[in-house]
Amino acid sequence: FYQDTLVTDAPNNAIVFTDTAGSQWTFNDFLTSPTGQLKSYQDPAQNLTTLTYGTSGVSLGKVIQAQTVTVAAPDTITETWTYDYFLTGTSAGKLERVSLARSVNAGPSVLVRKVEYSYYPTTTSNGPQNSLQWARIYDAAGVQIAAYYHRYEQMLGSRGLLTLILFPQGYEL
């Protein structure tokens, strides 16, 4: 017997799923496009994460922002994750960058960290075209603090299987 609930929130065009711990997931209802898309998540401590989706171009239907508001008395901390996508080229539509910014008590938003992604532009012996090649992490000052290299094994009839992630300790930056 399940204790979780699933209810319709008609005034907000939403369906709300609540688990027994008190976490709530809010989705678009069947009258709102795109149907079933996650709108927000609220944890048992009432910290709220809302999602914003792209409405056109390469980001259509993709998350472009996730914002979490956490109340840690006496402060209210807002963390904003921004997702950018390549606009052109062989990587068009793929994730280009994710940035984390933080503000306290409605103060200025300050960049904390970002990760930039690059993809194999063509198929090589190390990976198929458009597969993730590098994930480079930068601190708030723009200094690269880590890099992860991805290599793939070409298998007959497949796009390639990820066989190696080289962590920063595996080489010098």
Image: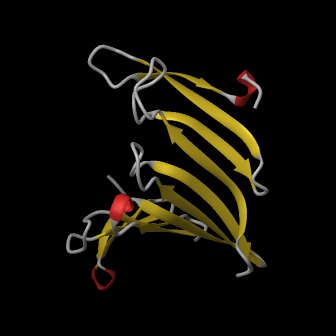
Q: Residue most toward the bottom? A: 11
| 25 sits left or right of 84 in the view | left
Nearer the observer, 172 or 88: 88
Residue at the spot x=56%, y=52% of the render?
97
Residue at the spot x=39%, y=52% of the render?
93
* Residue 130 at least partly seen: yes
| 8 sits left or right of 102 in the view | left
Q: Residue most toward the top? A: 156
Residue 81 percent across, percent down from the top left: 58, 62
Residue at the spot x=40%, y=47% of the render?
89
Quarter holding residue 109: bottom right
Residue 61 percent across, percent down from the top left: 34, 62
Instruction: Please name the colour scheme applied to the rendered image.
Output: secondary structure
| 68 sits left or right of 35 in the view | right
Q: Is residue 146 above or below residue 12?
A: above
Nearer the observer, 53 or 26: 53
| 165 sits left or right of 39 in the view | right
Q: Is residue 23 above or below residue 86?
A: below
Nearer the observer, 162 or 78: 162
Quarter holding residue 55: bottom left
Residue 33 percent across, percent down from the top left: 25, 70
Q: Residue most toward the front? A: 89
Residue 143 percent across, percent down from the top left: 77, 48
| Image quarter hosting the C terminus | top right
